[in-house]
Amino acid sequence: MSKQNTITNHVKRFREMNNGMSQAELGKIVGVTRQTIIAIEQNRYSPSLESAFRIAAVFNTPIEEIFQWQENES
Amino acid sequence: MSNYIRMVILLSGGLLLLLGWHFATVFGYLGTAPETRADFFIRLGIFVGALVVLSIVSASVMIKSGNEDELDPDEREKIAELKAERNGSVFVMISMIILLWFILQPMSPMAIANSILGIICLGEVIKITTGLFYLRKGV
């Protein structure tokens, strides 16, 4: 039995709540490309701790409200 | 697609075009292949020079268009590139080990040099394709 860790996020929701901030704008502030923000929102990429904290700081929200970690057994 | 990825594709594409032309001459489809070691190394030097010029020109174009910030890879691109480079390197290493056995067979130095060049070329193809796959499907 293998364990797969999944990190989900609400980046898109927080972005839309923040005056509809664009992916490119968020990417520029965080220091990643627009494509990386898209990948994060689609759960295709788990950002580094540094980037996750930066995203949380942009929305002025605790990191655990934006990113959630679940342990899946498959 | 970020400017960094565009530049990597442009440079790798340029390298593959040059090597493709070289192998077309080696297999007799286009022009004449280098026959002596000196000719071979001159051609290799021209390839390196062309790549340097291509990288300078593409970087200058990006800087002129005001996109110099995107010339550095971000964290996701770095991971994808690292994984793709590992795939390419594993292929090159395994192929070189196989080639070592072929060296024991009667082979001309030019054939060995072209085989090494071909292995590097295929390694680059594997690196580009797996890199783009990781960027598209997730790292």
Image (cartoon, rainbow, N blue to C red):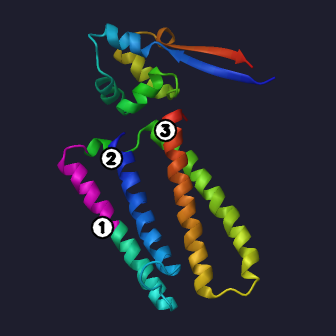
Identify which residue, B110 or B71, lies in the foreground: B110
Sequence-earlier tag: 2 or 3: 2
Q: Which residue extends farthest right?
A: A1
- Give the residue displayed 56% in from the left and 70% down from the top: B118
Q: Residue type at mark 2?
A: Leu
Secondary element at image label 3? helix
Q: Label 1 lies in what chain?
A: B
For label 3, the residue is B135
Confirm whether circles 2 and 3 share one chain.
yes
Query: Which stretch is magenta?
Result: B52-67
Q: Residues within 10 Å of mark 1 (few under 14, many from 20)?
A: few
Q: Is residue A28 above or below residue B77?
A: above
Q: Is residue B95 above or below residue A39?
A: below
Q: Is residue B7 above or below residue A50?
A: below
Q: Measured from the top left, where is residue A57 in percent x and y?
A: 38, 17
For label 1, the residue is B53
Q: How many marks?
A: 3
Sequence-earlier tag: 2 or 1: 1
Q: Residue type at mark 3?
A: Leu
| Residue A60 visible in this rendered orientation of the protein | no
Q: How far apart are the alpha carbons under marks 3 and 1?
A: 27 Å
Q: Measured from the top left, where is residue A40 in percent x and y?
A: 47, 24
Q: Label 2 lies in what chain?
A: B
For label 2, the residue is B71
Q: Label 3 lies in what chain?
A: B
Q: How far apart are the alpha carbons under marks 2 and 3?
A: 16 Å
Q: Is residue B120 above or below residue B22?
A: above
Secondary element at image label 1? helix
